[in-house]
Amino acid sequence: MPIAVQPHATRATQPPPSALPPADNLAPRDVAALAEALTAYHAHFAPLFRRAEQRHQAAQYLVGQLLDLERKSIEPLALALPDGNVQALQQFIGQGAWDDDAVLARHQALVAETLGDPDTGVLIVDGCDFPKQGRESVGVARQYCGPLGKVANCQASVVACYASARGDTLVDRRLYLPEQWFGEDYRQRRQRCGVPPATAFRTRPALASDMIAALHQRGDLPFRWVTADEHFGLNTAFLDRVAGLGLRYFVEVPQDTRVWLTRPRTAIPAAKPHGRPPRRERVQPGEAVPVRVEHLVAQLPADAWQVWTIEEGAKGPLVAEFAFVRAVAVRDALPGPDVWAVLRRRPGDPRETKVYLSNAPAAPTPETLVWLSGMRWPVGSAIQESKGELGLDHDEVRGWVGWHHHTTMTLLAHHFLVRLRRQVGGKGTVPHRAAGTPALAGHVAPPTARRRDAPGLARLHPAAESRRLPLAPPPSASPPRLSLEVTL
């Protein structure tokens, strides 16, 4: 099924949400090459749609998301396509009997071909919320909404982004259903939205760990590190599940997180003359108590801080001070795993300190830990591009199936643009591996750690001079913005 692509004639239209006008500046041969690339990309997924009509609608929807429309809900998208059929696209997205899991599995395999890098591959999980006006869409409730920064009526979800020195794109998603949706008073609403009867309540960290486990088990995407913000970092069950998969995490945590500087002794208390004998270990009397990380910051000597320059591309270098502390995490008032507490702040400014915990081995390279502290921006960038350019948050479907079908197609469209960016080369193309980027797969010889007198404090690379850490920069140019006419 060839896809013919032609530039639109000049016309007065509303600009896309990014406020940047579409650039119709491709030569005819470039347009033809784009059509071929889009046809070839669609062919990877075409066998997963059962009927010819579904394959046709999948191609139309994919192309429609690339048009320079201000609103990319089904009706304006269909009306902008040659021979577009609103009802057919509504059925394809809202009720189509095609398997999201199979399509996503193929998508992840293609992402591995495009971006996979065992040395720099990182999986990033984050929340992705959608403000909503009505109350009938699946999962809608008054809850904290990230885009609005407050409690509001919205849908919430969790997404996974794969990032490497080659680029980044979204690879999976889970819709979050608030606990109230599982009450009896929501039973009819669940049925109207088509929520599968076996669906059980899962917290957002639990949904994220489900995605990570599935991606790790499938094995297509090469990664050994997982990063996340403090909403996930403060959930110890999430951290322990990631570690249980044999993966390493680097997560932000609140400043009131408590750690031990040395591992305390524990024992099962002696039985008392009366009552049931104790079976659970307790920290022995006289052992040190865990300290809040914010108090630990105040105790660090000035020379424990190192200045690093992190290269993040288009916005220029980001300079920060780092301190590295070997500690013991707290689990149910008992000592848990050994971790690194990584502290990051603006040079000479202790007022705002970010805290990260990592189950990295005892002697990691500080380059790796600093590098990981900058590996949160790709997921925000991918979400913003998917919303602003591809209509991720423009859907007007209400049901479970429609939400999953729409987000699946958006993930495919975003990856197509990432592939296109790499294929056209030039400005905005991410190199395979930036020179000097630290390997993250555990092959690098660790630096010598020098331990101070205070137990549990380690100073890595104690030299005072500023250090520059080259990172793979984010694209400095957006993917090509195209106005398309498509014949399917």
Image (cartoon, rainbow, N blue to C red):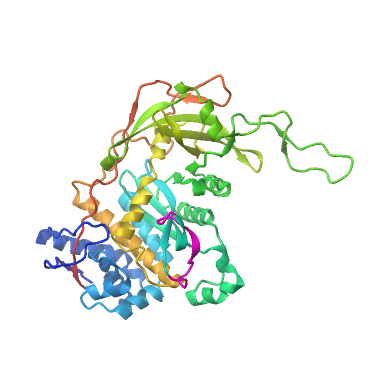
Image quadrant in which the C terminus is located: bottom left
Instruction: Name the one closer to the observer, 346 or 277.
Output: 346
Q: Position of residue 412 (x, y in %)?
A: 33, 61
Which residue is painted at 28% across and 35% down in the image? 435
Name the outermost residue toward the right: 273
When the figure is inspected, residue 185 is found, relative to residue 244, above or below; the finding is: below
Residue 57 in view: yes
Side (left or right) of 122 relative to 269: left
Which quadrant of the structure image shows residue 50? bottom left
Check if residue 319 falls in the magenta segment: no
Which residue is painted at 32% across and 80% down in the image? 87
Name the outermost residue toward the left: 28
When the figure is inspected, residue 204 is found, relative to residue 254, above or below; the finding is: below
What segment carries the magenta color? 134-149
Side (left or right) of 405 relative to 37: right
Which quadrant of the structure image shows residue 104? bottom left
Image quadrant in which the N terminus is located: bottom left
Q: Position of residue 273 (x, y in %)?
A: 89, 40
Residue 365 in view: no
Check if residue 143 falls in the magenta segment: yes
Q: Position of residue 484 (x, y in %)?
A: 19, 66
Which residue is painted at 32% across and 52% down in the image? 113
Q: Position of residue 195 (x, y in %)?
A: 51, 71
